[in-house]
Amino acid sequence: GAGVSQSPSNKVTEKGKDVELRCDPISGHTALYWYRQRLGQGLEFLIYFQGNSAPDKSGLPSDRFSAERTGESVSTLTIQRTQQEDSAVYLCASSFRAGSSNQPQHFGDGTRLSIL
Amino acid sequence: AQSVTQLDSHVSVSEGTPVLLRCNYSSSYSPSLFWYVQHPNKGLQLLLKYTSAATLVKGINGFEAEFKKSETSFHLTKPSAHMSDAAEYFCVVSGSNDYKLSFGAGTTVTVRA
């Protein structure tokens, strides 16, 4: 079946602009995660959604970052007033149910964001 | 809190020779541990996972890893490297809520013909 889909695959924008990144999880996956991957580094947790529960936003680096998810479908990550340090690959993952280590996270190919 | 240290930022091997990627973890409870692989411009793919069952875990593409609690290690091995194994590898430990993963900085593997 289809995997996690992210769009756009690449985004170049000027400093100060807002950007919106989209993630389509695997159908039936109730848990959805956003990560940031800076060049040559591992992944940083940003935010987690589980069904209709309140999301865990503890990883968002500043109030310029926000994310939404409607039910168990598409999620959008929004970065307002982008800064050069926001340049990174933003990865989305989904899983059947969080809180169980038997449910691995499945990753999309990411959005490569470059801030000029 | 938990953390992961990947001891090698870069590993270079010849095709057909063994691969060893080293990972040490720190956790205040019994962790779940994973290895993921990332090919260029792609997302992460799960290679294998340890979840307190057998300490020797077999994964896809001939990889395996051994959980050693006394050494707090979870090293990844493959007996014979293939050119297609050239990629970035991440050792990952789960958090107290299971969903929050902590990633190592990654090990880049290059395979020489």
Image (cartoon, coloured by chain):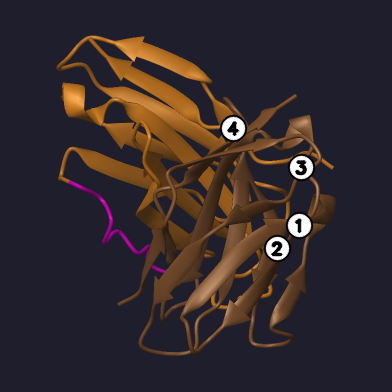
Chain colours: A orange, B brown
The disc label shown at residue A109, or none: 4
Mark with earlier residue (2, 3): 2
Task: Find disc 2 in the rendering and name its residue.
Answer: B48
* Along the line of sight, the residue nearer the viewer: A82 or A39: A39
Q: Residue at x 70, y 48 (%)?
A: A26
Q: Nearer the viewer, residue A55 or B37?
A: B37
Q: Answer left or right for B11 relative to B103.
A: right
Q: Nearer the viewer, mark 2 or mark 3?
A: 3
Label at residue B63: 1
Res. A107 in view: no
In the rendered view, tell whether residue B24 sits above or below residue A35.
below
For the residue labelled by badge 4, is the local secondary structure a helix, a strand or a loop? loop
What range of the chain is rendered magenta?
A: A52-61
Residue drawn at 72 percent across, 41 percent down:
A3
Q: Main secondary structure of the magenta part?
A: loop
Q: Amino acid at mark 4?
A: Asp
Whether the residues at callouts 1 and 2 have beta carbons within 8 Å, the answer is yes
SS for dot 1? loop
Three-letter amino acid code at disc 3? Answer: Ala
